[in-house]
Amino acid sequence: MSNWIERGQKAAETYVSQGVEVWIVEGRLTRDRADALLVTMNAPEVERAMLHLGAHFAISLPLRFPFGALARFFYTLALRLRAEVAGLVRRRAPRDERRMHTWLVMLVSLLPGFGRLAYFFSSALAGEKLLLLIPVDKVSRKLPFSVYRRLHLDSLFVFWARDEETGSLRDLFRPTSYRRAIVAIRGLGSDLRLASIVIGVNVAVFSVGAYLFLESGEAWETAPPGWFAERNVIPSLNALQLLAGAAFGIMAYRAFWHVKDGSQRDAAGIFLWGIGGIGLLVFAVDDYFTIHEHLGRWIQDTFEVLPGVTNMPDDLLILGYAVIGVSVLYMFRMELLSARASSTLLLFAAIAAVLMVTTDAFATTPALKALEFPAQTLATMLLMFAFARRFQEVREMMPVAESNRTGRELVKHH
């Protein structure tokens, strides 16, 4: 057993040291910084984490997915449960074990390929981000279909490895943020004419739908009536705006890599728009075809699960979308804090989306529930504006000839 653990620990240490050497050769890391990083691996808490990391490596050597993933998960779960039981017996909270064998480690351990690196995500190793970034970077290089190169993942790891301050979301509430927002909106310039047309269409469609509903005298309790019904006019308008935003986000991401003078900060921030574009595409399909609602009803009927704090079981799925969205925004908060018009529009869209999710999941009175649909239409429109503006900003950063050629290629592909 001890030989098995030693083999795994040696494999883990070799894996880290090889990754460090690659970063040195590529100029991402200085020799002095690399030596200091390797010294930190001798710290007591880091040594314990490396021991369990070695166990995960040892498990992964003979066992392939999904058996290795399950074995890693239950290894960490067993250690956590043992620590909790020992804490109850001794009447002392197992703080060190809770920092080591976290639920995040258990979840990451289930991933194929990346699962053996799970202990790098523990709080015990949180003080040295390079101990996480370098191994994850090394695994990412082995992703199929040349994903690492095609998606330019190296730019993301290089930025995160830097000591540059990414900012705090508290900066959004400082007086300078409001002035920056006004300047950014003024910078839209000629886009305001086209935006006013889109706003007029949204207001007209929503107003007609509300008027027809009030004239019909229908009840709202069972399901939204008239133009608000599933796959009717207003849901279709929202889906189209989400799809347009998704297309602009993906096109902005693809076009950015033709930019000659983009900074590392911009290169990392563009991932927000690429990931966001994919997210809008998924949400548009889900919302239009009411996939989450059908899934929520299936969960309720199959497992007889009743919502605790939300109105319906499917609202928990919507909250899941919201948590993922907020997490992505926080991860790329340096982009959200940018002085660009697209970032300001995205912030407004996020506020409208939060209002939409809150009223959808928690509203209990008709007055509060009535806010859901205008908030949804406003959010989808602002999201489309934000992603369209970011695409335009990227094109403005490109040389004229390259911009025209890339624009034609993107339109042809989409």
Image: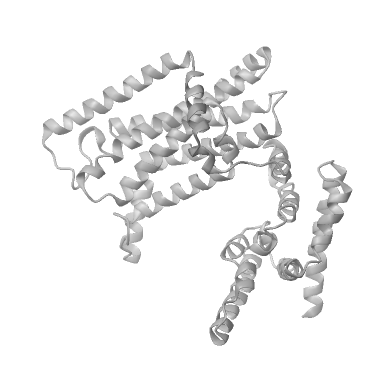
Residue drawn 47% across the image and 22% down it = 185
Q: Residue at x 11, y 36 (%)?
A: 217
Q: Nearer the viewer, residue 314 or 129?
A: 129
Residue drawn where x is 72% and y is 24% of the image = 261
Q: Residue at x 57, y 81 (%)?
A: 92
Q: What is the count of numbered marks? A: 0
Q: Is residue 225 above or below residue 46?
A: above
Residue 10 higher or lower than 145, as above or below: below
Residue 252 found in image quarter: top right
Residue 363 position in % (x across, y down): 27, 49
The front one of 169 and 400 is 169
Question: Eyeballing the image, is 24 above or below 85?
Answer: above
The answer to whether residue 414 shows anywhere in this view is no
Furthest residue to the bottom? 89
Please indicate whether residue 73 sits to the left or right of residue 148 in the image.
left
Residue at the front extreme? 175
Residue 368: x and y, percent?
Answer: 25, 44
| Res. 45 in view | yes
